[in-house]
Image (cartoon, rainbow, N blue to C red):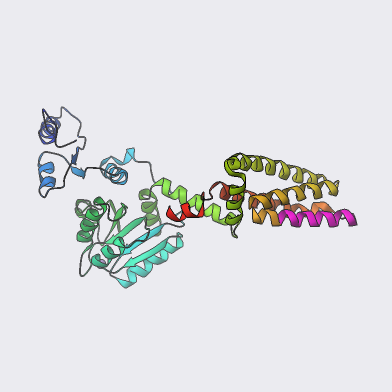
Amino acid sequence: MDCQMPELDGFAASRQLADLKKAEQLPNIPIIALTANALKGDRERCLQAGMVDYANKPIRKEHLARILHKWLPAKFIPEAHAEGSLEGVVVMLVEDNRINMEFAIEMLERFGCRVITARNGLEGIAEARKEQPYDIILMDVQMPEMDGLTATRHIRVLQQGGITPVVPVIAITANAMKGDREICLEAGMDDYVTKPLQGEQLKSILLKWIPPEKLAALNARRTHQKQSGALLVNADIVEEARAVIGQEYGNILRLFVKNTDYLLATIERSIRQARDPEVLVMYAHSLGSSSGYMGATRLCELARALEKAAHAASLTHGDITKLWPLYEELQFIWQGTCYQLHHQPTTKNQSAAA
Ligand code: MN
């Protein structure tokens, strides 16, 4: 609900709706205020008018998502993708107790997370402000120097000001006393876990709060990295090819992809049928030269190796089915190469500026 509107402003409208809710003439649906400026006292005005929370305009996507998560009944929120992998997720852990910290780090690292640590609220804020990526904050509540509730309030202000990335903050509470949950949520935390931390509980809360797109992106990057243990594409050659071919580069790349798929299919058939090593030599040679031009360095090396091996087999009447692992590697490398060729920055200068 926008606060400033003609005819009837958001505060008045919200009060009327609150009355209807009290009279049970309306279902008890949370009203979130949209305020133009976070004036001191705005929050109180909103709460008094019967709104449960507020968001500053211009509202950012992440903040909107967070606030909807916070106020929508759990049934509307997709349940934690419990089977998901947390590998590559960066967790900021703010905890003063050394032993607790070690336990938490151990668990998180077992999930494949990377952990950034801070020993109290002040350090937590300092870490949050650093230019480093992190996906979620785990915040102890009781800490010296600055407690977790205060630190969270500060971090939320930084997030709303666009100074730090908008990430979920999960409280680590010592005792799940009734009311603890409310205190944490009131401070702007999204959810909480209780001490002593338990692996499954911790994992499911992380999976619940880290956006699925983020997990999917990490997953894709991981797969891609596995395929590209070594550099698959030589950027200098790609750049040169672009310069030489000019506007036709896109078409040539498409042609190259289609041709490589065809060559690989033919190579596969040829090895399976174990006939005609000369044909295999010819196709491997063709793949080697075209991938060389396109800057697909690793593919080129493998094609050359295949060509050589097939040539040797043809001279000695050797068994070319033994070349199958080489074909499999070619196929594997081709997936990553294809991806990299399509994601090469246009020129070095532009990529430096991006
Ligand atoms: Mn503590």
Q: Quadrant of the N terminus?
A: top left
Q: Is residue 34 left or right of residue 273?
A: left
Quadrant in which residue 10 is drawn: top left
What residue lies at 54% left-to-right and 52% top-to-bottom?
223
Queried whether the magenta region covers residue 304, the answer comes back as yes
What residue lies at 30% left-to-right and 61% top-to-bottom?
128
Q: Is residue 138 left or right of residue 349?
A: left
What residue lies at 72% left-to-right and 51% top-to-bottom?
289
Quadrant in which residue 45 is drawn: top left
Q: Which of 308 and 115 is in front in this view?
A: 308
Q: In this view, does 323 lie above or below 16?
A: below
Q: Say whether residue 156 is visible.
A: yes
Question: Percent position (x, y) of residue 152?
Answer: 23, 57
Question: Percent position (x, y) of residue 174?
Answer: 26, 62
Queried whether the magenta region covers residue 13, the answer comes back as no
Classified by dominant secondary structure, the portion drawn in magenta counts as helix
The part of the chain drawn in magenta is 302-317
Q: In this view, does 102 lie to the left or right of 126?
A: right
Question: Percent position (x, y) of residue 233?
Answer: 60, 54
Q: Say whether residue 81 is visible.
A: no
Which quarter is ligand 1 in? bottom left
Q: Which of 138 and 177 is in front in this view?
A: 138
Q: In this view, does 285 lie above or below 251?
A: below
Q: Is residue 62 left or right of residue 89?
A: left
